[in-house]
Amino acid sequence: MSNELKLICVDLPAPPLFDKAAPDGTRVGYEPSAAELVADVLGKTVRWVVTSWSDMVPAVQDGRGDAIWCGQGITPSRAELVDFTRPYAIFDESVLVLADSGINAADDLRGKRVGAIVGSTNLALAETFDGVTTVPFDGATDDVLGDMVQALRDGEIDAVVDDDVAIVPLGEQSDLAVAFTVATRNRWGVSVAKGNDTLRISMDAALNKVIADGSLEAEWKRWMPDLPFPLTADE
């Protein structure tokens, strides 16, 4: 049995979740730190397998990696393609706009173009806003969030929806603002190929352990001190 846990993700800057990999392939942020905790419980070392957003599911399905650990919300449509662990994170969703847009609430988006990643919980939320035109971004590049923010700045869209942990830091830039946040409690999980119950169950047990012993909460507070830790071992 290999002592490597091959985890699939994109290679892009999305702090505090993760940043671009160092030359030696190591990564920093909440997600890599959480993955290292789980791998340690399993007696394995992490090796990251880099793909695009759109190639992550095919990569785990064809065995290029053991699991996807890359900011995936647990959704029914995704659960038709992969099997998820219990959550290792729970986030709300925020709307990013230009600072001078005058958009402060969902009603202000009527008649506007709202971008989000195709197939995401964020796009599903955008579709609930009355009178908006949703603009799906397919994740074909390595930096889909960067693509959406650039489209916002270029006037191609009027708002971006993503999880609060990714949007809130962007709202600190002078030309951008967080218009509002919706308490969707979006659950993020690790996904494995359909039927890989052995790995999924062992990762669930490892996640429960690092939640119960406080080590996952310590990493959460290290990387995201302004967000309350949302998890319990007996979820």
Image (cartoon, rainbow, N blue to C red):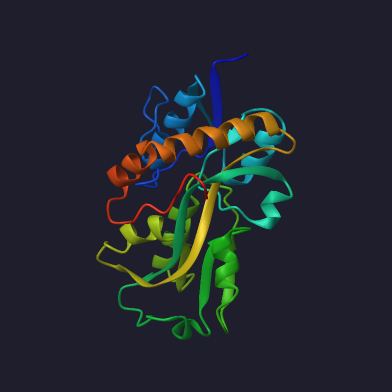
> Is any part of residue 50 visible from this angle?
no
Would you say 87 lies left or right of 231 here? right
Would you say 48 lies left or right of 166 here? right
Residue 133, image quadrant: bottom right
User: What's the residue at 70%, 33% (across, down)?
Assistant: 197
> Outermost residue, top direction?
1
The residue nearer to you, when weighing 6 against 144, is 6
Please determine whether, in this image, residue 126 is positioned above or below residue 42. below
How many numbered markers are drawn? 0
Would you say 174 lies left or right of 165 here? left
User: What's the residue at 43%, 54% (across, down)?
Assistant: 146
> Outermost residue, left direction?
174
User: What's the residue at 53%, 54% (across, down)?
Assistant: 187
Q: Quadrant of the N terminus?
A: top right
> Is any part of residue 49 visible from this angle?
yes
* Residue 35, position as x, y percentages in the image: 46, 33
User: What's the residue at 52%, 24% (across, down)?
Assistant: 42
Residue 134, image quadrant: bottom right
* Residue 33, position as x, y percentages in the image: 39, 35
Please determine whether, in this image, residue 232 is positioned above or below residue 219. below
* Residue 194, position as x, y percentages in the image: 73, 38
Please determine whether, in this image, residue 43 is positioned above or below residue 12. above
* Residue 65, position as x, y percentages in the image: 61, 29
The residue nearer to you, when weighing 78 against 158, is 78
